[in-house]
Image (tube, grey):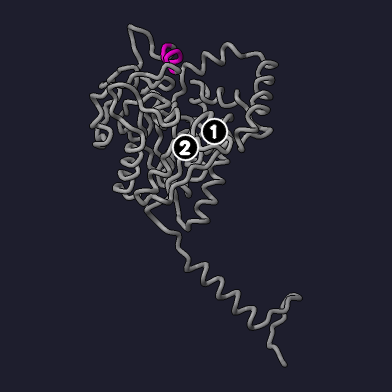
Amino acid sequence: MRVDSTVADGFVATDAGMALEEDAAVAADQFTPLGPPYPVVFAHGFFGFEELGGSFLTYFFGVQEDLASIGETNVHTPAVDPFNDSTARGEELAAAIDAILADSGHEKVVIVGHSQGGIDARYVASTRPDQVAAVVTIATPHLGTPAIDIIRRVTENDDFRRFVDDLVRLVGRPLYDAVGEETSFFAALDQLSESGSAAFNEAHPDQPGVDYYSIGGRSDGNLAFAQCAAEDSPDFIADFAWVRDPIDPLLAVPEAFIDGGFGDPEPNDGLVRVSSSRWGRFLGCIPADHFDQVGQILGDRPGFGNRWRHLPFYRDLVGWLRSQGY
């Protein structure tokens, strides 16, 4: 049987083979990535995880399951190195988002980052703006936090830093899948300091085509009307403007170091000042300390007299994002 073919530069191409290649090229040209509603990617903070040591404890406690119960099934909570700077963590998050986009067929994602996860999200938006439609940061220290600077000042010895990093890798590996040889507790602290944050912000400016939103956290009974003022706060945040939050006892000590003292109090959530959490379009503050914001520990409630709850908050946040066209 005769097979028609063409010969050029030493290659033999059959008519059938050329037709298959042409069909593949046409199919590739015709493929258009899906638009909104985009996948929602939750980015965890320092010490964060997807599941801790294979247990039922998740960082955004019960959030993914609760959103799935109302039909929001395209929600992801990838794990990145819990003890590293946002350059390393951001690269890991970008790789996870690549996989999410390839699997879902969508063009972009929306990233919701808590604490350092918001810095990771901004790194991805800066280096891969093609991946990201919007970034929402919650209690993220965009300008650093004094608590970190205090720790750095008392841990400047290089030998001590190496010892701690080695210990973190040793102890962390059984609990965190993302802990590796490059894990560095102090790399994270250096970048989250006030000077480190300034350098990061200069290196990774906001990108055209990506929308940036931020939410602060206030606790220790502070209403912080002036610091939490927002031009157009969504109802699910504005409705809690008069609700006070009693701070978690575990955060009382660091809160005392960052509140600015009695003469000039700085509203904060126990770890991050409201003034440091403002970035892009600021949506206001929620009455929740740094643990309450993600339902920790083990989904416990914020405290006596506080009716705010983290699961309805994330339902409302994702619903609001959908209403904005994401």
Looking at the rendered structure, the kind of residue marked 2 is Arg
Tell me which residue sits at (40%, 28%) in the image: 300
Determine the CA span between mark 1 and mark 2: 9 Å
Tell me which residue sits at (35%, 44%) in the image: 318
User: Tag 2 or tag 1, which sits nearer the N-term?
Assistant: 1
Vertical placement of 253 versus 233: above or below?
above
What residue occupies the far top of the structure in this picture? 263
Q: Are marks 1 and 2 in contact (CB under 8 Å)?
A: yes
Of 47 and 105, which appears nearest the observer? Answer: 47
SS type, badge 2:
helix
SS type, badge 1:
helix
Looking at the rendered structure, the kind of residue marked 1 is Ser
Task: Tell me how many marks there are.
Answer: 2
Residue located beneath label 2 in the image: 122
Instruction: Locate the N terminus by quadrant.
Output: bottom right
Q: For mark 1, does the 10 Å Cα neighbourhood hold few (<14), some (14 to 19), or many (20 or more) residues?
A: many
Which residues make up the magenta segment? 251-256
Residue 140 painted magenta: no
Tell me which residue sits at (37%, 53%) in the image: 37
Q: Is residue 88 left or right of residue 271?
A: right
Vertical placement of 3 versus 228: above or below?
below
Vertical placement of 279 versus 186: above or below?
below
User: Residue 195: x percent and y percent?
Assistant: 51, 21
Write down the quadrant of residue 246 in the picture.
Answer: top left
Residue located beneath label 1 in the image: 86
Vertical placement of 301 versus 126: above or below?
above
Q: Main secondary structure of the magenta part?
A: helix
What residue occupies the far bottom of the structure in this picture? 1
